[in-house]
Image (spheres, grey):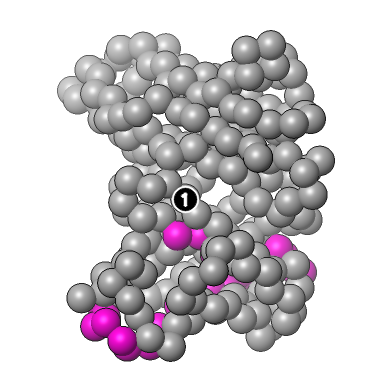
């Protein structure tokens, strides 16, 4: 079945540092890929998405490129802020599998210190 | 604009007691509705989804049930809670089934003692 693997956390960075959170996936066909973010005590919010190979999703300074050859969708940000502290979830949606559900990774907790 | 409300936000229940979590979506019609559970260190688990009134699909066997009495209302229930039911429960909705783009509520934290 489909699966998503993302780097283990927690990740602690200083403000203005460069961020990379790795995400790789296993799926048949051509899934859509997502990054969701969960701020402390809240539900998840969609951060960005990409629906086909080589697409780049971007939002709030975050970027991720859909790499089919490496089955990856790594999240990057050039300069993190304290307000970026949250848990980040990589997810895939495979409509070809006939399922109604997203497949989520286990999440990576990011802490940004001043 | 569309909004989603979940309540209660926090509850502490004894083992063996019943549970009812409610979720309501506003500003849209015929949404697809989902219940997820987020347990510590275990990521997100889809519990139930619904594509219409009275239509509920369960993803995993468990001590919980779901109902959709109205188009925009989704209820998660249990007759007798277990310790293992503790977690953070998230309701979500989507427009159409085949997008993967979900809109989540703020969650309900359940502690079973």
- Graded by Cα atoms within 10 Å as few (under 14), some (14 to 19) or many (20 or more), the crowding at tag 1 reads many
Q: State the image quarter where residue A84 is shown.
A: top left
Q: State the image quarter where residue A37 is shown.
A: top left
Q: Secondary structure at mark 1?
A: strand
A35 horizontally vs B55: left or right: left
Q: State the image quarter where residue B39 is shown.
A: bottom left
Please state, as top left, top right, bottom left or bottom right, where the C terminus of chain A lies in the image: top left
Residue B110 against residue A77 in the figure, above or below: below
The answer for which chain carries disc 1 is B
Residue B29 against residue A21 in the figure, above or below: below
What's the residue at 64%, 37% (across, down)?
A2
Task: Please identify the dominant SS of the magenta region.
Answer: strand
Return the x and y of residue B85 as percentages of the image width and height. 36, 69
A88 horizontally vs B1: left or right: left
* Residue topped by disc 1: B44
Q: Nearer the viewer, residue A24 or B5?
A: A24
B89 horizontally vs A17: left or right: right
Q: Nearer the viewer, residue A38 or A103?
A: A103
Residue range (magenta)? B12-37
What's the residue at 76%, 54% (across, down)?
B97
Q: Is residue B94 visible?
A: yes
């Amino acid at each position: 079945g489909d699966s998503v693997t993302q780097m283990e956390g927690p990740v602690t960075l200083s403000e203005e540092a460069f961020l990379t959170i790795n995400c790789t996936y296993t799926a048949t066909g051509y899934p859509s890929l997502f990054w969701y973010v969960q701020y402390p005590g809240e539900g998840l919010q969609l951060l960005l998405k990409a629906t086909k190979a080589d697409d780049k999703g971007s939002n709030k300074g975050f970027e991720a490129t859909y790499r089919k050859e490496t089955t990856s969708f790594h999240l990057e940000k050039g300069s993190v802020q304290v307000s970026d502290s949250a848990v980040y979830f990589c997810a895939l949606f495979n409509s070809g599998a006939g399922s109604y559900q997203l497949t989520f990774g286990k999440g990576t907790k990011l802490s940004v210190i001043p | 604009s569309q909004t989603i409300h979940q309540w209660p936000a926090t509850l502490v229940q004894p083992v063996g007691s019943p549970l009812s979590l409610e979720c309501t979506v506003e500003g849209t019609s015929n949404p697809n509705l989902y219940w997820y559970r987020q347990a510590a260190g275990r990521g997100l688990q889809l519990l139930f989804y619904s594509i219409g009134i009275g239509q509920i699909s369960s993803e995993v066997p468990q001590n919980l049930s779901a109902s959709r009495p109205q188009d925009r209302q989704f209820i998660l229930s249990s007759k007798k809670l277990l310790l293992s039911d503790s977690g953070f429960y998230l309701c979500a909705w989507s427009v159409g089934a085949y997008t993967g783009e979900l809109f989540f509520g703020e969650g309900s934290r359940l502690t079973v003692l």
